[in-house]
Image (tube, rainbow, N blue to C red):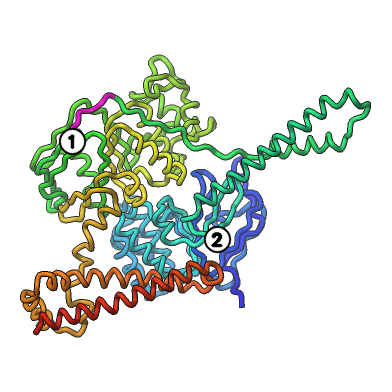
Amino acid sequence: MARAPLLQLSSISLTFGGNPVFDGVDLTVQPGDRLALVGRNGSGKSTLMKVMAGLVEPDSGARSVPPGVSVGYMEQEPDFGAFDTLGAFAASGLPEGESYRVSVVAEGLKFDPATPVAAASGGERRRAALAKLLAEAPELMLLDEPTNHLDIEAIGWLERELSETRAAFVVISHDRAFLRALTRGTLWIDRGDLRRSDRGFEGFEDWRETIWAEEDLARHKLDRKIKAEAKWAVEGISARRKRNMGRVRALQAMRAERASLIRRKGTADMALEAGQTSGRLVVEAKGISKAFGDKLILRPFDLTVLRGDRVAFVGPNGVGKTTLLKMLTGEVAPDSGNVRLGTNLDIAVFDQARAALDFSMTLWDGLVNDPDMAVSGRSDQVMVRGEPKHVVAYLKDFLFDEAQARAPIGSLSGGERARLLLARIMARPSNLLILDEPTNDLDVETLDLLQDILGDYDGTVLLVSHDRDFIDRLATTTVAMEGDGRATLYAGGWSDCQAQRGPRPEERRTPVAKPATDATQAGAEKVRKGAQGLTFTEKHRLETLPSLIEKLEAEIGKLSDFLSDPDLFARAPDKFRKASEGLAERQAALSAAEEEWLTLAEKAEA
């Protein structure tokens, strides 16, 4: 028996300021749906989500939610006016006596529910909004950029929570790894239309390119037909006394159809120009450390950055990544050790707080009044990599239209502010880029372009980001800041870092924890002492088996979740077969590993 949908939108149309946002959008969300909502910045993703949540009334069409179905929405900028603390806000929708749910979620998202609203940062407020939604546990969750302001550990926790939930959800995110891990379908807003694919985000780009290729072919055929019919209309008159008015009307209809075709919005015309070549040595830090009062930021740490390196800094929020960046560039002095900067450095900075932007200024004034971009005696031009360019033309390179040029910077969306800041730092040559959270709010296409540009950049890049995919594509070295002042260097990006460092201390098992759950503390001590009598190979195997067991259990859990989809066999029989075989193999390997551990443990104890 088919289950009733959780939400339906029928023929939804909406116009803002005379410009259509959607026209005739239809959407059905079923129980169990896990949907990515994607589209360019400004395409209307957040607006559509607000329509789904019932917060924005469309001009026409209908929204339908069956009685008793709960729909929850995570707002990007919630109203905290009636609440003293973040916890009071997050618990406001819960039944009496169930506020403990907020504490459970807050631990995973790493924020303190007792934090006063007045003292909370923007990131803490966003996490409180996410905690409110997760604690309420509605049947349909609408998540607008839930990973923004979360560190990698919190993003991993959220992934696990959403992978285990029975609720349906629709999520907007720029985090490719997050979307690939969670989604089973994709909603794509493009030029006012909403398309749906029953493949997760993993298949989005192939699907998009196929649609664009079909559109280009159809447009090309229509252009050729219009050209042929126009030629007939002109040249055929001399051979006839009377036109075939049916063909004339058909030609007019084809021209109207061609005029109605909305061209795809291009990618930003971004470019980076490396200035003078820096010295081979860019930054050399020896024994640098830092503390603020009782809080230790960095233990003595060494780092050498050479020309062309791409160094990523990762770690939990508040661990000191930005402080370390500022020490490496000389903006903050270390408590001990020293930093030596190379020669001929031209530094450009992208800061996560967007402090370089004056929100009261218009986009126009913000560019022409920038000392690095000003053109002497001209108020309508900016200097772009050594050449004057009209300010509107340069803004158009970054996908801003002429009307936005006179709008205040404060009215821009997060993605638009990020693009404007990129426009500023890309206007002048540089050879050292400091990028502190550059990926927040950028759409997939702009992220792709930024990755390509940075890959071809002749200078050096120091990067702070929580976007695992972005780090993997870009970084040659990763500095993992673990807290308590610990910082460790790893070759490669995020995935390489994970593979090299293995489980973190808090995730590591003691050898007896899983396989011998009934062992007493004394028994465990005997095993540890007895292990000294094993051969070197046996001792090493005894120590490494728990990690292998943990890995196999995690893989079994993922495959079991995958196979729990009741429609999988009918939809993708090959995937079902491969997953079933993989599950059986891992279950057999797990049994063998546990047996081997018990044998070695008994031998050690004896």
- The residue indicated by pointer 1 is 283
Q: The N terminus lies in which quarter of the figure?
A: bottom right
Q: Can residue 86 be seen in this view?
A: yes
Q: Residues within 10 Å of mark 1 (few under 14, many from 20)?
A: many
- 545 vs 130, left or right, is left
Q: Closest to the observer: 56 or 559? A: 559
Work out how far the residue at label 1 is from the one at label 2, CA to CA, in angstroms: 48 Å
Across and down, in percent, residue 367 comes to: 41, 27
Q: Main secondary structure of the magenta part?
A: loop
Across and down, in percent, residue 295 comes to: 15, 53
Q: Give the range drawn in magenta.
A: 276-281
Q: State how many labels appear.
A: 2
Across and down, in percent, residue 574 comes to: 50, 67
Residue drawn at (26%, 73%) of the image: 549
- The residue indicated by pointer 2 is 198
Residue drawn at (23%, 48%) of the image: 491
Residue drawn at (24%, 44%) of the image: 322
Across and down, in percent, residue 501 comes to: 21, 58
Q: Closest to the observer: 237 or 284? A: 237
Residue 106: within the magenta? no
Q: Work out whether 146 lies above or below 16.
A: below
User: Residue 226 appears in which quarter of the rendering?
Assistant: top right
Task: For mark 2, give the secondary structure.
Answer: loop
Q: Work out whether 80 lies above or below 510.
A: above
